[in-house]
Image (cartoon, rainbow, N blue to C red):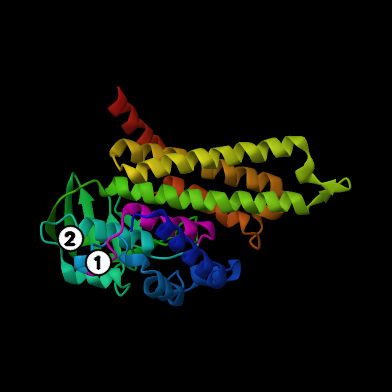
Amino acid sequence: MAHNEERELLRQTVAALVDKHATPEAVRTAMESERGYDEALWQLLCEQVGAAALVVPEELGGAGGQLADAAVVLEELGKALVPTPLLGTVLAELALLAADEPDAQALEQLAEGGAIGTVVFDDGYAVNGDLADIVVGARDGQLQRWTEFSAEPLTTMDPTRRLGRITAAQTTPIGADPGIADYAAILLAAEQVGAATRCLDLTVQYTKDRVQFGRPIGSFQALKHRMADLYVAISAARAVVDDALTEPSATSAALARVVASEAFSKVAGEAVQLHGGIAITWESDIQLYFKRAHGSSQLLGQPAEHLRRLEAEVL
């Protein structure tokens, strides 16, 4: 599924589903629900888009796509902050595929959306960790399938992303870790670019709509410069993420993570300032983007750690 036209079609299909089923109201309903996501929308994503089947090879019941295909879907979901178990599920699939003989049954369940997956890194908590049926632990260069485990939800600042702490009771080895944390960083960076893009769009729209001194504040020169700076930051992040998707490595992943985190945090911070007091009210969507920006930058190891890793490789 490497062709750009097919990927563009994938993007449009997901965008249409998000527009229809993930309005700001629907996202709030989903994040406040028991499972923290809209199960009907998840089913549509799995059935109509094959979202959870993208990275699974065709011979194992998947679409035989690449990391970039999953990134397209995560970016579109990121735009509207749609809570779904996709990120954790894709990571679990990539981890299971690292085995010499992958567990075909588990992969099939994950690919059709019947089971939810996640990967636990060193810190012990995981995306949709309280909901996962299939859990893989990544530690010290090795992957383990957690066959028995207990999980509890964690209270987080970002209500649009459910996290859970998972404790292993019984594990079996899968094999060497091909760099699942790097894949996670790159996919998360793609999602951050999507969220930053929409957050900037909302802010530009707001500054155009809001009239001060008889003309929109968006027409003021200083504001135009700020918007242009943010646009450049997002474009640069997108380019770095695209490079990482083409050639995933520890270095490209760390770079994507740092640049995307910084761009999204910058955009969300400016959005709060430009919206003024309204942005921190519960009714505003901007506070959700701000919380997502903060939460994402803390997830999977902070950007500063990734920078240190980069420096260690360069020096």
**Local crowd size for mark 2, using a 10 Å CA cut-off: few (<14), some (14–19), many (≥20):** many
Rendered residue at 67%/37% (across/down): 226
Q: Nearer the viewer, residue 4 or 271?
A: 4
Place residue 119 in its image quadrant. Answer: bottom left
Q: Position of residue 128 (x, y in %)?
A: 37, 63
User: Can you identify the residue that label 2 sits on?
Assistant: 145
Q: Which callout, 1 or 2, points at the residue further toward the start of the chain?
A: 1
Q: Position of residue 9 (x, y in %)?
A: 45, 62
Rendered residue at 63%/61% (across/down): 282
Residue closest to the far top: 315
Total numbered circles:
2
User: Can you identify the residue that label 1 sits on?
Assistant: 134
Q: Amino acid at mark 2?
A: Arg
Rendered residue at 18%/44% (across/down): 141
Q: Position of residue 28 (x, y in %)?
A: 55, 68
Q: Nearer the viewer, residue 218 or 282?
A: 218
Residue 244 appears in the picture as rendered? yes
Q: Secondary structure at mark 1?
A: strand
- Magenta-colored span: 61-81
Which quadrant is home to the C terminus? top left
Q: Amino acid at mark 1?
A: Ile
Rendered position, 315 above or below 270? above
Describe residue 153's horizontal placement relative to residue 138 as left or right: right
Task: For the residues labelled 1 and 2, say whether their Cβ atoms are less than 8 Å apart.
Answer: yes
Describe residue 217's horizontal placement relative to residue 74 as left or right: right
Residue closest to the far bottom: 40
Rendered residue at 45%/53% (across/down): 191
Rendered position, 26 above or below 168? below
Residue 165 appears in the picture as rendered? no
- Is residue 68 in the magenta section? yes
Which quadrant is home to the N terminus? bottom left
